[in-house]
Each structure stands twice: as structure tokens, then as C-alpha cells.
Image (spheres, rainbow, N blue to C red):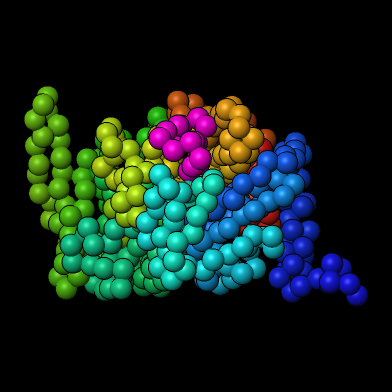
């Protein structure tokens, strides 16, 4: 057999997976991407091979006739992070939400398994931890976001779970959360759920785990033993008004108390006590009221920001709402950096006013890839991203409120069943969430397919 015809194990796994996913992608009616190819040349480096970086790698590899693409990422694993909520609620096993990164990186891509320390966007040089400097002609910035565990006093990533304080924003944390929810359904007591004051990935995740915990206690016939309280740092339960009335109804029906404008400051894991601040704005004045609560079970959301190297490299917004956490200063439609026109940025680290979700990335990838190719061809970027994001808010074991919206917070239904009434939770959306989105991720998006 000639070398060209030999099929490697890595390639076999990819082909097998892609084949089984074809039906799902076709059924979802989303494999409509018009084929395209370009002779554009240039060395592309992608920093970060998660949802955004690997999808970009796969699509650019398909669209460029002579691709020269390098990926820098230190991770051994490709996590399907939206599945963490399902691990934490016992729907998925932990091993169902990750694959080896070596089986996910497209064959044609040069993978440098390393961490970026800094980038000099003037000289187009990337400083890595172990491989010295790497140069680029065009840069795809997709390192996701940084979870700042140290910004919540009394707990670290390593001590998650101590004092029954949990977070599904970590893989091991999600596993521990499931054990704790089962135990809580036996003991009862007060459960506290918080989100955070920074932009964070999947704004719906803290609500999902709260509502699933509530339903789990009902499934175990122990609901009367539990008091469940939800604290949000925001001034509304959700920042897309269209979905708020039904969400409020659900919380009321389920007897989950909501407190707005409240942020978590610290946790005493020995006493099982949280320290929070309620911040009300009256005119120009901010009135800060401390809240201290004892709990039996806690689920919290840590503050998040752009990775430190992104800020230190001068990629971040310097003014406006997105500056404080260092999100990257890109044009919200073209996803091209506002200062460095050979840089595109998408995914969680992008400084754009929409939700940080894989669903948003699904729509960002073809725009960013096409615009990057235009830049490589010496043309202006013309493709536009409308801010589409989706957040499937799981409301119980069996139903999901599929929130889909754009920059203007208008509903943007993309699945036929949501056209019935997308303001309400649906069983079909649960099926989509539990059975279809993960294969769509691993065998669609990461293969450069299933975007439109
Ligand atoms: C609990 C939870 C629930 C979620 N639920 C949903 C949901 O229901 N629906 C949905 O659409 N989305 C959901 N999301 C959000 C979704 O997972 C993220 O938006 C998405 O994974 C972000 O993709 P990304 O490529 O920007 O970043 P990531 O996928 O996080 O990838 C970033 C990559 O960059 C690499 N990297 C980081 N720093 C460096 C560096 N210095 N040098 C080199 N490489 C680096 C990392 O190793 C990683 O591989 C959820 C997330 C969580 C945690």
C-alpha cells in the first residue's frame, strides 16, 4: 500500500466519528455551507485549540488550497464543556465529555504542544514556554478565557468540594457536584446558587444546575427538606428579556427564591457560610449591603477574564465595559482586531457583546475564516457576524428552554421545533441538548462542518 493510501488510527477514528454524525448534522438542517476554496498564502498560527481554535483550523484547512497552519495548545484533552452540566446532574458519565486532543487536531495542522507566554503583534512573534519564538503572518486568537478562582476568598480550584462548595466550571468540579447533589437530596437543608459579576461562559449554566438540583430532590421525593435560593449579580434573572417572563414563572413554580444585584465575595468552608454583597444603585449612589448566609450545599460561579497573556500583549479593549476583564478588541461584526488587521479573534476571549457559548462560536467560525482569507488575499473583510448565541437552559430532567438571540437580543430560532413557541421550555430541546449537540461538536464543528 502506498503511503498516501495508508490510513492512520487517528484518521480512522475521525472518519468513523464523522460518518456517524453526518445523519445528525443533516437532520439538524445545518449542513448548508457553500463550498469555497482560495489560493491565498501565508503562515497562520492559531493560539488555543478548543471549540473556536480547532473549528477554525479544520475550516481553513478545507478552504485553503495550500494551507500552512500551526496550532499552539498545551492541552492533552478536548473537553466538551457544555456537557459538564450533564455530568454534574448524572445524565452523562464523566468520560463522555472529553476526547484525546491528538484525535481531534486535523491531520494537516502542525500542533505545537506548548503554552503561549506573550505575543508581540508589531513584530508578529509569539513567545512560548518551551519552543522559543514562533512567527506568523496571520494570527487566530482563540485561547478561551481564564477562570480567576483566586477572586473568591476561602476557596481555590484545588479545594473545590471542601465545605460542600462546588462549581461545574471545572471538569473535576462537575464530577464532585453530582456526588454532592445526590447527598443533598438525602440530607436536605439550604442550597445556595450564585453567578458572578464578570462576563462568564454560558450565562445559563448556574441556572441550569440550580433547576436540575431542585428537580432531582423532587425525583427523590425529598423536596420538602430543601430550601433553594438563587443569587445573581445582575439586575435581571437573564439578560435577554424575551426569555425572562417564563424563567421567572419557572422559579416561582419551583419555589426557588431569587435575589438580584448580589455578588459572592468569599466562602468559609469550615462553617459552611457565604459572604455576599448586595449592591443597589440609587441615582449616582451605590448602596452596599453585606449578606451572610449559612448553607448545606453551595454552587458558585467564579469570576472570569481574558487570559493574562492576552492583556499583556496589548490585544485588549482599553476603555468601555469590556476593558476591565481584558477581552480582545475586535470588530463585533468582522471579528478582525481593531488595531492589528492580521489578527482575528473569536470564542470566549473575544470582546464582543454576546454570550460566551459554543453555539455562538458555531456562527463565528465561518465569518472569521472567510474574513481571514480575504485579508490574506489583500481584500477587505466583508462577512458579518450578527451576534447569534444560544444557551439551552435546562429547566428539568426532560425540558430545555432553548434561548437563541442576536446582538439586539432578538430571538433567532434555528431549529424547526423552536418555531412552535420558543419562549417556553420543550422536550424536543432536551433531546437536542442531550443527544445531538455533542456529536455535532466532535464530528461536525471540529471537522469544519455544520456551521450555517
Ligand atoms: C459548565 C459549562 C456549561 C456550558 N454550557 C454551554 C451550553 O450549554 N451551550 C454552549 O454553547 N456553550 C456552553 N458552554 C460554553 C462553551 O463551552 C465555551 O463557550 C466554549 O468552549 C469556548 O470555546 P473557546 O474555543 O473560546 O475556548 P476553549 O474551548 O476553552 O478553548 C481554549 C483553548 O485554548 C488553550 N489555551 C489557553 N491558554 C493558552 C495559552 N496561553 N497558550 C496556548 N493555548 C492556550 C486551552 O488549552 C484550550 O484548549 C459551557 C461551558 C461550561 C464551563
Left or right of 289 on screen, residue 27 = right
Quadrant in which the N terminus appears: bottom right
Residue depicted at x 48% and y 36%: 341
Between residue 225 and residue 146, name the one nearer to us: 146
Between residue 84 and residue 340, name the one nearer to us: 340
Helix, strand or loop: magenta stretch: loop
Between residue 7 and residue 280, name the one nearer to us: 7
Q: Position of residue 287 (x, y in %)?
A: 9, 37
Q: Position of residue 274 (x, y in %)?
A: 18, 60
- Name which quarter of the figure residue 118 lies in: bottom left
Residue 343 within the magenta-colored segment of the rendering: yes
Residue depicted at x 18% and y 62%: 153
Between residue 11 and residue 341, name the one nearer to us: 341
Name the residue at the right extreme.
1
Left or right of 269 on screen, residue 286 = left
Residue 327 within the magenta-colored segment of the rendering: no
Left or right of 206 on screen, residue 277 = left
Q: Which residues are magenta?
A: 330-345
Q: Position of residue 382 (x, y in %)?
A: 59, 27
- Name which quarter of the figure residue 331 lies in: top left
Amino acid at each position: 500500500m502506498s503511503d498516501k493510501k495508508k490510513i492512520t488510527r487517528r484518521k480512522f477514528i475521525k472518519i468513523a466519528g464523522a460518518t456517524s454524525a453526518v445523519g445528525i448534522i443533516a437532520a439538524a438542517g445545518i449542513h448548508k455551507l457553500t463550498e469555497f476554496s482560495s489560493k491565498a498564502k501565508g503562515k497562520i498560527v492559531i493560539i488555543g485549540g478548543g471549540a473556536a481554535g480547532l473549528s477554525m483550523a479544520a475550516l481553513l484547512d478545507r478552504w485553503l488550497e495550500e494551507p500552512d497552519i500551526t496550532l499552539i495548545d498545551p492541552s492533552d484533552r478536548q473537553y466538551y464543556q457544555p456537557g459538564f452540566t450533564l455530568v454534574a446532574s448524572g445524565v452523562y458519565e464523566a468520560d463522555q465529555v472529553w476526547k484525546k486532543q491528538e484525535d481531534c487536531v486535523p491531520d494537516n495542522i502542525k500542533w505545537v504542544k506548548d503554552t503561549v507566554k506573550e505575543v508581540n503583534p508589531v513584530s508578529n512573534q509569539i513567545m512560548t514556554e518551551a519552543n522559543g519564538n514562533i512567527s506568523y503572518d496571520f494570527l487566530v486568537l482563540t485561547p478561551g478565557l481564564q477562570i480567576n478562582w483566586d477572586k473568591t476568598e476561602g476557596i481555590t480550584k484545588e479545594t473545590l468540594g471542601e465545605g460542600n462548595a462546588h462549581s461545574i466550571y471545572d471538569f473535576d468540579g462537575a464530577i464532585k457536584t453530582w456526588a454532592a447533589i445526590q447527598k443533598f437530596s438525602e440530607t436536605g437543608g439550604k442550597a445556595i446558587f450564585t453567578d458572578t459579576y464578570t462576563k462568564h461562559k454560558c450565562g445559563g449554566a448556574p441556572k441550569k444546575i440550580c433547576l436540575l438540583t431542585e428537580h432531582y430532590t423532587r425525583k427523590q421525593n425529598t423536596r420538602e427538606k430543601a430550601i433553594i435560593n438563587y443569587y445573581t449579580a445582575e439586575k435581571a434573572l437573564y439578560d435577554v428579556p424575551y426569555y425572562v417572563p417564563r424563567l421567572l414563572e419557572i422559579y416561582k413554580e419551583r419555589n426557588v427564591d431569587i435575589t438580584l444585584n448580589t455578588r459572592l465575595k468569599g466562602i468559609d468552608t469550615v462553617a459552611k457560610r457565604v459572604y455576599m454583597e448586595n449592591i443597589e444603585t440609587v441615582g449616582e449612589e451605590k448602596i452596599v449591603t453585606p449578606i451572610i448566609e449559612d448553607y448545606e450545599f453551595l454552587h458558585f460561579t467564579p469570576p472570569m477574564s481574558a487570559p493574562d497573556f492576552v492583556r499583556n500583549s496589548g490585544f485588549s479593549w482599553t476603555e468601555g465595559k469590556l476593558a476591565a476583564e481584558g477581552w480582545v478588541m475586535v470588530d463585533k461584526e468582522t471579528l478582525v482586531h481593531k488595531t492589528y488587521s492580521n489578527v482575528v479573534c473569536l470564542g470566549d476571549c473575544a470582546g464582543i457583546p454576546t454570550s460566551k457559548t459554543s453555539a455562538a462560536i458555531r456562527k463565528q467560525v465561518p465569518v472569521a475564516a472567510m474574513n481571514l482569507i480575504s485579508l490574506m488575499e489583500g481584500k477587505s473583510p466583508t462577512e458579518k457576524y450578527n451576534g447569534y448565541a444560544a444557551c439551552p437552559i435546562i429547566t428539568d430532567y426532560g425540558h430545555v428552554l432553548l434561548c437563541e438571540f442576536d446582538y439586539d437580543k432578538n430571538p433567532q430560532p434555528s431549529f424547526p421545533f423552536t418555531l412552535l413557541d420558543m419562549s417556553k421550555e420543550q422536550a424536543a430541546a432536551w433531546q437536542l441538548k442531550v443527544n445531538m449537540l455533542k456529536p455535532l461538536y466532535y464530528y461536525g464543528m471540529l471537522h469544519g462542518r455544520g456551521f450555517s
